[in-house]
Amino acid sequence: MIMFFEEVFRNLSSWGLPTLVLLLGVVEFSLGLYKHHWNTNEKLLDIACFTLPKLVIRPLTTYYTLQFLPYVLGDYKNAFDWVPFWWGFAIIAVADDLTQYWYHRLHHEVPFLWRFHRTHHSAPYMGMAMASRQNVIYTMFFSQTYLTAVLVFLGLGYPALFVRGIKSLITTLAHSSIPWDKPFYENRWLHPVAWVLERLISTPATHHAHHADTTDDGVGHYKGNFGNMFFLWDVIFGTGLITRQYPKSYGISHYQQEEWYAQFMWPILKSKKEGSELAKNGPMVKEDEKASLPVSAPVITTGSLYGEPELKVM
């Protein structure tokens, strides 16, 4: 069993991560963590979003990007293969995740872009099944796919794929319905570790807050906590909320259980639900989603290593 998991982590960028997601998904499902929320429509949407991008969209996008690059960067093929692995890893991790932070944030703050990202937030639950739940257009223009292809062409393939594997692992676990970070908050001797961990990477507590359907409880924070692999960007740009608590409910307050194909393929296919953001002539953004994040957003953090809250404006 130990050897099996060693192989899984050694091959995260290929078959390892899908295998890990499947195993953890089985655990979530068997424990009943999705409860009554995972109906047929949600299952079909999660399955489509998980399989089609991995089997069709991203492979084709990567293939054609690699075919196109020689025409624009022909003289730079393998130009950076001299860069040491760990330097390449560090540079790529920062560049890749910072790019995605802004890609993600803009889809929340620009009304026109919201509907392309809305699918990821419509799930009334958290779990492995919805970690890759995205509209097809959002997936096609996802920056990481193109950046990875370019870096492979430039000779930084190994560090780029390693970053992709580690990042996918962190973001998938942050979406998990299993609160693996809870022991760090409940055990006082682990508080110093928790203080660093929750500011460095996305955890279930911080990312679940981003998927909450309300901000009224002081835990939900869908107007922030945009970080994917690194929560550090939210700390730097003042969009983070750290409470060490988990929201009571998730999703979008005005969710109409839009058809799975409309959520996956909008605007190619539209919902038949009247008044939906995904319906023909539907509103771009419904009223309770219009509020944009202020420039200087309050960040509630655990002010000491022992969990006393402190309010800061970044």
Image (spheres, rainbow, N blue to C red):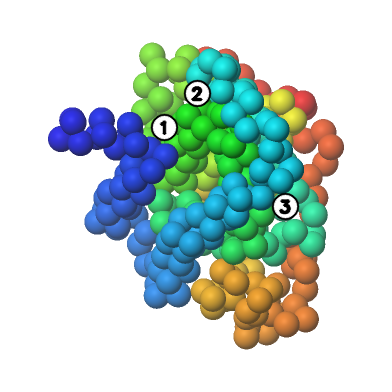
Q: Count the marks.
A: 3
The numbered mark at residue 70 is none
Between the residue at mark 2 and the residue at mark 1, the CA separation in whole angstroms equals: 9 Å
Residue 129 drawn above or below residue 93: below
Q: Residue at x 34, y 36 (%)?
A: 11
**SS label for mark 1:** loop
Going from N to C along the chain, the mark reached first, 3 or 2, is: 3
Image side of residue 164 versus residue 288, left or right? left
Residue type marked 2: Leu
* Nearest the eye: 245 or 155: 155
- Which quadrant of the rendered structure holds the N terminus? top left
Between the residue at mark 3 and the residue at mark 2, the CA separation in whole angstroms equals: 25 Å
Going from N to C along the chain, the mark reached first, 1 or 3, is: 3
Q: Which residue is mark 2?
A: 197
**SS label for mark 3:** helix
Residue type marked 1: Asp
Circles 2, 1 touching at the beta carbon (< 8 Å): yes
Q: Is residue 197 visible?
A: yes
Q: Residue at x 50, y 23 (%)?
A: 197
Q: Is residue 246 visible?
A: no
Residue 265 drawn above or below residue 99: below
Q: Residue at x 65, y 72 (%)?
A: 266
Residue type marked 3: His
Counting other residues with Cα less than 10 Å from the Cα at mark 2, is it few (<14), some (14-19), or many (20 or more)? some
Q: Which residue is mark 1?
A: 181
Image side of residue 290 versus residue 84, left or right? right
Q: Residue lying farthest left? A: 1
Residue 98 coordinates in the image, percent (x, y): 67, 33
Residue 301 coordinates in the image, percent (x, y): 62, 26
Going from N to C along the chain, the mark reached first, 2 or 1, is: 1
Q: Which residue is mark 3?
A: 108
